[in-house]
Image: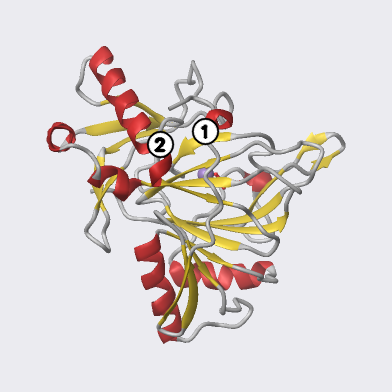
């Protein structure tokens, strides 16, 4: 595969399969991604309904509630139900609440005021350079460009399952170092990362704490090296694994609609963003939910 999202083939829009599960009206996509059609997140969810939503999420890895009209408090209420929210440490990016961050290309006085303002973003896993990466990221589409800016989701469990047995055996017990340089490599892998860029080594094959399934927990944007391997061996194996996990057969391409509230599971998916016209406005309201140490 390629180093550029622009070279990644378009995943055809498929209508998906309609299904009802515990009262939820769903449209399922392959290999991951489930639309939930009949939930209004301005209302608190009953325990039973929330439970059903979480089951669908754990099984489908990415869920999207369509046609939502959400104030920050509505999104926070849902996010806190999923788990403890992370506080935004980059103070200038924090929104109405310390857990809210905006991803947007809005400018004030000629300067971008929010995070990840422009362009494509290579496949990655949110916060995988931290000891306890986010388990969930919750993104609400407030303003979207007429075209472009799709988000690609790669199913990391499907990728793990499809590895040959030799490769599974080879990566068993290995850890990889993930590094993120906010300045140099926010959207592309930086050639040079600064010494103080946050970094952490996690198992390459991670077991999902809820489903028990194994996922390939590395990514092209942030994973630098396999701990304990000679540099050339490490690079060759990583490239092979990146190419494998970015196989379009494992990818769902999300075409945003206004009012989408999307939640992905960072423990078992990677995501990438396609480019969009910088003259158009794209605003997403974002929360992340704290996760457990990967094992
Ligand atoms: C993120 C992210 C992708 C997008 O918020 O972590 O990668 O489509 N966003 O904006
Ligand atoms: Mn991200």
**Location of residue 23 (image quadrant):** bottom left
Q: In the displayed structure, would residue 241 be above or below residue 128?
A: above
User: Which numbered dot is residue 246?
Assistant: 2
**Location of residue 76 (image quadrant):** bottom right
What coloring was used for the rendering?
A: secondary structure
Q: Are marks 2 and 1 in contact (CB under 8 Å)?
A: yes
Kind of element beneath mark 2 = loop
- Tell me the crowding category of disc 2: few under 14, some 14 to 19, or many 20 or more residues within 10 angstroms, Cα based: many
Location of residue 204 in the rendering, given as x and y in whole percent from the top left corner: 26, 38
Q: Disc 2 versus disc 1: distance between alpha carbons?
A: 9 Å
- Tell me the crowding category of disc 1: few under 14, some 14 to 19, or many 20 or more residues within 10 angstroms, Cα based: some
Q: In the displayed structure, would residue 188 be above or below residue 50?
A: above
Q: In the displayed structure, would residue 229 be above or below residue 223?
A: above
Is residue 87 shown left or right of residue 140?
left
Residue at the spot 31% in from the left edge and 43% down from the top edge: 159
Location of residue 14 in the rendering, given as x and y in whole percent from the top left corner: 52, 56
Residue at the spot 51% in from the left edge and 82% down from the top edge: 45
User: Which numbered dot is residue 8?
Assistant: 1
Location of residue 241 in the rendering, given as x and y in whole percent from the top left corner: 31, 31
Foreground pick, 188 / 87: 188
């Amino acid at each position: 595969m390629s180093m550029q999202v622009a070279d990644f083939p378009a995943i055809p829009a498929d209508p998906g399969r309609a299904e009802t599960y515990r009262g939820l009206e769903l449209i399922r996509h392959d290999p991951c991604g489930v639309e939930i059609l009949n939930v209004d997140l301005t209302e608190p969810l009953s325990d039973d309904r929330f439970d059903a939503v979480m089951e669908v999420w754990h099984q489908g890895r990415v869920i999207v509630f369509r046609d939502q009209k959400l104030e920050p408090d509505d999104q926070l209420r849902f996010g806190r139900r999923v788990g403890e929210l992370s506080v935004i440490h980059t103070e200038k990016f924090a929104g109405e609440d310390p857990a809210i961050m905006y991803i947007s290309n809005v400018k004030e006085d000629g300067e971008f005021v929010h995070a990840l303002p422009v362009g494509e973003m290579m496949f990655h896993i949110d916060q995988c350079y931290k000891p306890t990466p986010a388990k969930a990221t919750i993104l609400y589409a407030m303003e979207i460009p007429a075209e472009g800016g799709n988000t690609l989701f790669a199913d990391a469990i499907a990728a793990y399952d499809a590895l040959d047995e030799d490769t599974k055996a080879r990566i068993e017990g290995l850890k990889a170092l993930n590094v993120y340089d906010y300045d140099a490599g926010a959207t592309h892998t930086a050639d040079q990362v600064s010494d103080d860029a946050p970094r952490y080594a996690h198992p390459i094959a991670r077991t999902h704490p809820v489903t028990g399934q194994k996922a390939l927990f590395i990514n092209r944007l942030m994973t630098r090296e396999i701990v304990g391997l000679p540099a050339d061996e490490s690079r060759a194996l990583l490239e092979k694994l990146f190419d494998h996990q970015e196989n379009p057969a494992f990818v769902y391409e999300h075409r945003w609609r206004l009012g989408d509230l999307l939640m992905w599971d960072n423990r078992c998916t990677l995501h990438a963003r396609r480019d969009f016209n910088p003259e158009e406005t794209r605003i997403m309201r974002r929360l992340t939910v704290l996760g457990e140490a990967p094992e």
